[in-house]
Image: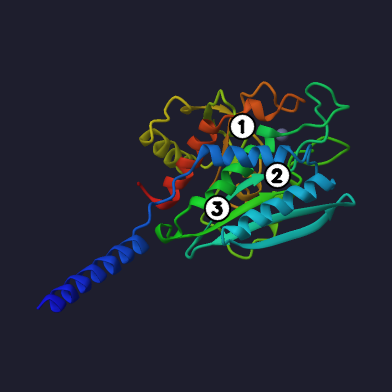
Amino acid sequence: MCVGRVDVRFRVFLLLVLFTTACQGTSREPLVFSGEAAYAHVEAQCDLGPRPTGSSANRAVGDYIISVLEDEGWAVETQEFAYRDTPVRNIVGKAGEGPVVILGAHYDTRRQADQEDPTQPVLGANDGASGVAVLLELARVLDLDRVDRQVWLAFFDAEDNGRLDGWEWCVGSSYMANHLEVVPEAVVVVDMVGDADQQFYFEGNSDPTLQQELWEIAATLGYTETFRSEYRWTIYDDHVPFAQRSIPAVDIIDFDYPYWHTTQDTPDKVSPASLERVGRVLEVWLEGAP
Ligand SMILES: [Zn+2]
């Protein structure tokens, strides 16, 4: 019958619609780290001006970090304390399940551009904003179903005013390392990772095994020109307070940056492609090969 045939066709059509919808619901395109999206976070931070610990711009950039993390569904915790009468705030976004790994970056900027003109502050496009930008873009793209660990995205305050008025380096990360209630399996710090002329070398205070693992992932992604398998610098950075507690910790840092601690550390020195290389390495490290 005519009616019966229409009915059957309609049922088949409905089934197809349901099947297609179900497929779309379960097999969405995996998100991949975008250098352009990360670069937008560099610009957003620098639009706030220099962001030294205790300043209103520092508070504002912390609020920006918290809002991005919450929008991406991360549980946010803060650690607030005073250092030399100055308020300090670490921010941590947590997601996933399993042993803890920490990805860290400092979000404060140096209050004196003492490599050039100590009367001026540093804007910190690379020294500060680049590492934060990589972590915030990871907050968007990490597929936690593919990560068998609990990820902490840690944003350290008060890293970058060492030797100014008797301040120490790495105040925020030291505080976090001193107040851990669980021992992380690994810590990877990203600092000064956005230089358009990017070179990373093995760093002397980093865990050699974990460092090798990260550099091998970079090689599989074709980044051997930027991730060089030779030692060059030994740096006291936010990874050291964790390394001192025997936690495997690595600092991914490009210390060959002519604008370091000058007024010239501005967004035009940072490139989306550089941010993307670092972000992809961390993404593959956590998720496994694509
Ligand atoms: Zn610095």
Left or right relative to 81: residue 102: left
251 relative to 29, above or below? above
Q: Earlier in the sequence, mark 3 or mark 1?
A: 3
Q: Quadrant of residue 21?
A: bottom left
Which marked residue is nearer to the observer: mark 3 or mark 2? 3
Looking at the rendered structure, the kind of residue marked 2 is Tyr
Left or right relative to 287: residue 116: right
For the residues labelled 3 and 1, the Cα–Cα distance comes to 29 Å
Residue receiving disc 1? 234
Q: Residue at x 59, y 28 (%)?
A: 195
View extreme (front): residue: 2
* Mark 1 crowd level (few <14, some 14–19, many ≥20, 10 Å Cα): some
Nearest the camera: 257 or 64? 64
Residue receiving disc 3? 139
Q: Earlier in the sequence, mark 3 or mark 2?
A: 2
Q: x and y percent of residue 212 in the render?
A: 44, 38
Nearest the camera: 10 or 182? 10
Dividing the image into 4 quarters, which one contains the N terminus? bottom left
* Mark 3 crowd level (few <14, some 14–19, many ≥20, 10 Å Cα): many
Residue receiving disc 2? 107
Which marked residue is nearer to the observer: mark 3 or mark 1? 3
Q: Earlier in the sequence, mark 1 or mark 2?
A: 2
Instruction: Please say whether residue 177 is visible from this viewpoint.
Output: no
| Contact, mark 3 vs mark 2 (Cβ under 8 Å) | no
Count of marks placed on residues: 3
| Contact, mark 3 vs mark 1 (Cβ under 8 Å) | no
Nearest the camera: 262 or 40? 40
For the residues labelled 3 and 2, the Cα–Cα distance comes to 16 Å
